[in-house]
Structure formats: C-alpha cells, structure tokens
Image: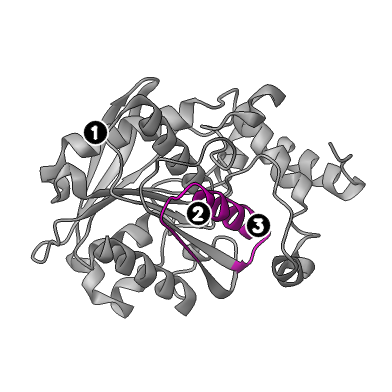
Amino acid sequence: MTRPTPDLEAMVAALEAMGPEGLAGLVPPTPDPSLYLRDPVLASVQTRDVTIAGLHGDISGRLYRHPTEPRGTAIVWVHGGAFMGGDLDMPEAHWVSLAIAARGFGVLSVDYRKCVDGVHYPAPSDDVLAAWLWAVGHGDELGASSDHVHLGGASAGGSLAAGVTKRLRDSAGEMPASLVLVYPTLHADLPPMSDEVAAATEALREAMPVELVRWMNLKYVGSEELLDDPYAFPGVGDAGGLPAVYVLNSDRDVLRASGEAYAAALEAADVAVTVEYEPDTRHGHLNEPLQPAARRSVERIAAWLEAH
C-alpha cells in the first residue's frame, strides 16, 4: 500500500475527527424550492415515503410516480455519499428521482445504513438488496411489472447497486431489467488511469488523492480482507451473467477510471454495456440540479430506461 502523504494524513485525521454526525452530513442540502418554478412538471410527481423491513432493521424509501403518464417501467435508485453520508433529501436522491418520475418512470429511492459508528459492509448492501426485493414484489406501487424494474445508483450507490446485482446473479434472484451506474466507485483501489483521464483530472488529484479513495473504501468494509470481496467491490471478480449496463461518468473525476475499467471487464465477459461521460463535470454533478450538465445526465438516464 502506498504510504499516505502528510496532506492525505491531515485529510484523514480531519474526516475522522468529524465523528458519525459530521460524516453523515457530508452531502449537499435539500434541493432549492425554486426548482419547481424552473421545472413546474416536478410538482406533478406524486411521492410517498415507505418503510421496508430489512435484515438489520427498517429501511427508509420514497416512491415517486407520475400521476397521468406512466410508462410501465421503473427504477430502484440508490444515492451516493462515500458510504458514510447522504439521505433521501439530497439532490442526488430527491431531485434525480423527481426528474426521472416526471418523465413517466416509477422510482423507488432507497436509503441504507451508513458506515459510521461501527457499521460496515455488508449492512448497506443488505439494505439495498432488501429494498430491491420489496420493489419487485410491489410492482403495482411502482407502476411496472417486476421484469421492467431497473436498478441504479450514483457513486457509492452505484457500487451498492452493482454489488447487489452480482448477489442476485449468484443466488438466482430476480435480476434488474438493466443496471444504471453514474460516476460509480467499483474498486477498492482505483485502476490505472488512461492518459485521457489522467490529463482531465490532473488539477483535481491534490484535492482527491487516490489513497483517500482507498481509505474511504476501507471504512466501508472495515477490514483489509474484504477489499477483495466481489460483492463489496463489484469491479473485481467474475463480470459475466449480468443484465445490460449503462455507465455514465463525470468527465473530470478520478473515479472515471473505475467506471471505465468496469465497463471493459463487462465487455470482455460479453455483457452488453454502454459507457459515456458527461463533459466538463466533476464527481457528484447530479447534486447540482440547476446546472445544465445535471439535466443532461437525467435525460441520458431516461433515454436508457426508455430503450431498455
């Protein structure tokens, strides 16, 4: 393992000093209410909070439905937050779900246990798995039959979605219609960057050293031995036997190396995969709903769901 630089050690110390409440708060605020004025169709989406029984206790979820134009297709959506933060009200969860539902797709936005205060994998994965099983058993509430329900997520949520899909594959569970991954983190250690990714992220790597990514991942699993677990980090292990996968990376994001390496592994395993990037964006751009790039990304996701 590469020894952390003094700057990295200071970053880690600062994060650890924040404690569970501070780490859990490392997310953007609830979307600006002015979004409803800018995009009035969002106000027509019907929402309802649900409680899902899980292996480790209750899980919070939120259902989103278009009142008049359902397409018969739905997605279970998992927000990010470095496995340590995030909630159903952050833009990456709430605004994204509203925007997808406004286009006629049912959405179940899922929360999960955060890896703070002694919580580690597999608890978050178990929560997402329980939410997926609930969704395919409640297709009427999502407006879709179970074979028209997709699974997706952003950043850490993308990793959880991909890991759960592998678990379903290996347990003969009902698979998603497709897998939608937005700037996902899928490897414990970032794969080597292509020259293109290295050039695009050179100015950012001081703020997000690759060693810090590994520290966050170790916080997620809790032990070095689990860094090779293919369900915790779906970028390792057998990539075959999965449904079609859509990977949407941020252009200027060190984690783009993970998304691209995973897409290459899927292609080598004869899995249908499409990989794209949103130009001139950084990691987490779905948390900026007022920016054109976030809206373009939602359109990309909706187009994928419609085509699959």
For residue 91, what is the image quadrant? bottom left
Relative to 85, does residue 222 appear above or below in the rendering?
A: above
| Residue 147 in the figure: left or right of residue 122 | left
Relative to 59, does residue 258 appear above or below in the rendering?
A: below
Q: Earlier in the sequence, mark 3 or mark 2?
A: 3
| Disc nearest the viewer among 1 and 3 | 3
Residue plotted at (36% across, 25% down): 171
Residue 191, given in percent of the width and then of the height, sits at 70, 50
Residue 240, given in percent of the width and then of the height, sits at 46, 41
- Range covered by the magenta-colored residues: 251-275
Residue 236 visible in the shown view: yes
Residue at the far left: name it. Answer: 68
| Residue 54 in the figure: left or right of residue 87 | left
Q: CA distance from mark 1 to mark 3?
A: 33 Å
Helix, strand or loop for disc 3: helix
Residue 85, given in percent of the width and then of the height, sits at 54, 43
| Residue 186 in the figure: left or right of residue 296 | right
What count of labels does the image hold?
3
Helix, strand or loop for disc 1: helix
Which amino acid lies under the numbered mark 1 shown in the image of this protein? Answer: Trp
Residue density around tag 2, few if under 14, some if 14–19, many if 20 or more, within 10 Å = some
Residue plotted at (77% across, 60% down): 205
Residue corresponding to mark 2:
267
Q: Viewer-proximal residue, 263 or 209?
A: 263
Residue corresponding to mark 1:
134
Q: Viewer-proximal residue, 158 or 37?
A: 158
